[in-house]
Image (cartoon, coloured by chain):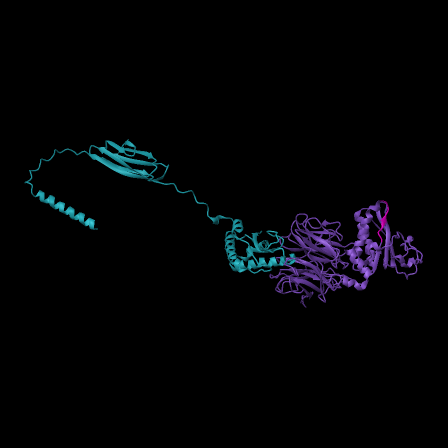
Chain colours: A purple, B cyan
Amino acid sequence: MRLLATLSLILSGAGLLAAQQPPQITGVITHPGKPLIAVTAFRGAGAAAPLMDLFNQTVMSDLQGSPLVNFVPRTLYPTQVPQTSTDLIAGVKTANQAANGLRLTDWSLPPTSAGYLGFGYGAEDHGMFVIFGWFYTADPHIPTLQQAQVFGRVYTASLDKAGAVDAAHRYAADILAVFGGKSLVGTRIVFVSNRSGHKEIWVMNWDGTNQKQLTHYGSISVFPSSSPDGRFVAFTTYAPGYPAIRIISIDTGRQLPFYNQRASMNAFVTFTPDSKHVIYSSTAAGGPAQLYMANIDGSNFHRITASGAIEVEPKINPKTGTDMVDVSGRGGLPQIYHMNLEGANVQRITAGTGEAVNPAWSPDGEHIAFAWTKGFEPGNYNIFIMDVVSQQTTQLTSHEGRNENPSWAPDGAHIVYASKRGRSSQIWVMNADGTGKHPLTHAGNNEEPVWVNAEK
Amino acid sequence: MTKRRASLTLATALTLVIAAGCHKKAAPPPPPPPPPAQPPAAKPTINFFTAEPSTITSGQFATLRWSVTDATTVEIDNGIGQVSPNGRRAVNPTATTQYTLTATGAGGTASAQTTVTVSTPPPPAAPPPQSSATPTEILSQQVHDIHFDYNKSDVRGSEQPIVQEDASALKQIFAMDPGFVVMVEGNCDERGSAEYNLALGDRRASSIKNALVNLGVPASNLKTISYGEERPLCTESTQECWSRNRRVHFSAGQ
């Protein structure tokens, strides 16, 4: 299905790109005219051979999932492919030569029509999995092979499936970096899981590997959020007997000091871009939960909203650090509001119908993802994204269970979210245009994912 | 009334007839000589005849005591028979019994009665009254959940009587134990977002606490907490289940 769509895209040209998209997808994420990338299926020698299918699949998935490039399907490639840079033949084939795939022009001309070519091979070296990966521009106007080479690198990883996936992510990330892409390597996802019998905070790599439990309170620990430096996770736990805020180190689990106001509830931490201040929700004033700003250790708190209605889920714009969104009941059912960090210039940005909750900023600070019951009964949420300025919305999930708590990947191209299908809630990831949905968790119930930046 | 007047009239008539007959008798003979002067035989005297206790329950004993002088024989009925002039006898009648003591001597006969009353045994003791329940028992048995409409935290009309009943029971608890703390727990159904529901559950708990305080429940004994949608009573996706989960529940605190 996806293959066919991509195929027709390429054959019919960029002019038809928009027409091929589902009508509700706007131009928020997709980039017409993005470069066409061909990457060969790498072959492997010795103990690396059984891992190459996984490596090739992962590279293709990462490139297909990116809004920065178009991945040319491998069915359109020449029959012969280069495996090392020395396999390449310079120049353009003459009229009586076959397009054997060893000239860059064999890739730039139809039917492949690629602007760039990636190739390489895998091997075992001293018990490690080693990938030799190259990336070339296939522009026929570049005179020499040396000038056409964008990069050639060696990737070393463990000689197992995890190593194959890791090497593939790094190679794909290097390709995407050429086009301004931010690598997801080193990014993590914190989430809530009840696998231990209690709701605890867990962390995993962004591709779902290395899932491990961070908290061991044996209580109810929920609503994680992460500091922009990727080092800390804040969450709400009932461990002290009432819902209170904790901030811990993701790496060590060490708890940072945080002063909880005397209140029946303190929850929903969002960090300023410099990770020095937080805004959170508290009932300290006695009425409905209101927003407070404080230092990272909870000191110097002061109230910034006085709406007389429930104010939860503040989310500071990670780009500007001067505006934020939150979820407010001031109009009745919960909706998403935009305001500055003093709680002023309040404007509702969702349509006012149904319930709109769980706002999450894109890294560029121009979009939010959120969960909305639009068109469905209460509780039947789907993931939408919105251009905050134009308030144009795009629906990313539909008829796939209850979908909520979206969180944007640092590359701006992926969204992690919780999808409850039947009784079981799991963490899913998708491209920011709604394609490529797949689960990252399977055991127990998992919810409230937050994509954590790589540590700075 | 009429019958009694008739009887009186008859008696009067008979008297008149007898009197009239007497008048027809001849003159009376002279009086006989006085009998020889000898000390008259003394009539028996019953000094006392008692039953102690005078009231027993069936199966218990009572003691008859008596003292008689100038008697040659003393007898008590109801199967006791002849007894000495001074004595006592334990009896255990199963029904109320009147005992008659008859003393016979040269001077004549005397008698006296005493009664032993037998009461039926009392019914088994009644169970202890409800007021002896502990505060924890009252909390679990008499303080009931209060339910809410979707996305609402105000007390709906149909729940007002329950709030009042809860207030009475809570006041009883705090009167028994002024240090007792009750947690007022706000809960929501699963449909709202977990985040919004945490704050909504807090509103529900707070709303019920305020209503109870207005009904005289001491505020210092009530603590609110929201569990949002973390503690559902049921997990079916039905209106019935959702309405059960939208509740304020009470539990014992520290």
Task: Give the residue at x 17% y 34%.
Answer: B40
Q: How far from the left and from the top, in percent, is residue B107?
A: 20, 34
Residue A400 located left or right of residue A78:
left
Total of numbered circles in the picture?
0
Q: Is residue A420 left or right of residue B171?
A: right
Judging depth in this view, the residue of B193 and B110 nearest the camera is B193
Relative side of B252 to A319, left or right: left
Give residue A392's position: percent from left, percent from top.
Answer: 71, 65
Q: Quadrant of residue A24?
A: bottom right
> Is residue A47 shown to the viewer in this render?
yes
Q: Which residues are magenta?
A: A40-46
Q: Quadrant of residue A385?
A: bottom right
Residue B80: percent from the left, percent from the top?
30, 32
Taking A327 as reference, is A195 above or below it? Answer: above
- Quick check: is B39 in the magenta stretch? no
Q: Is residue A44 magenta?
A: yes
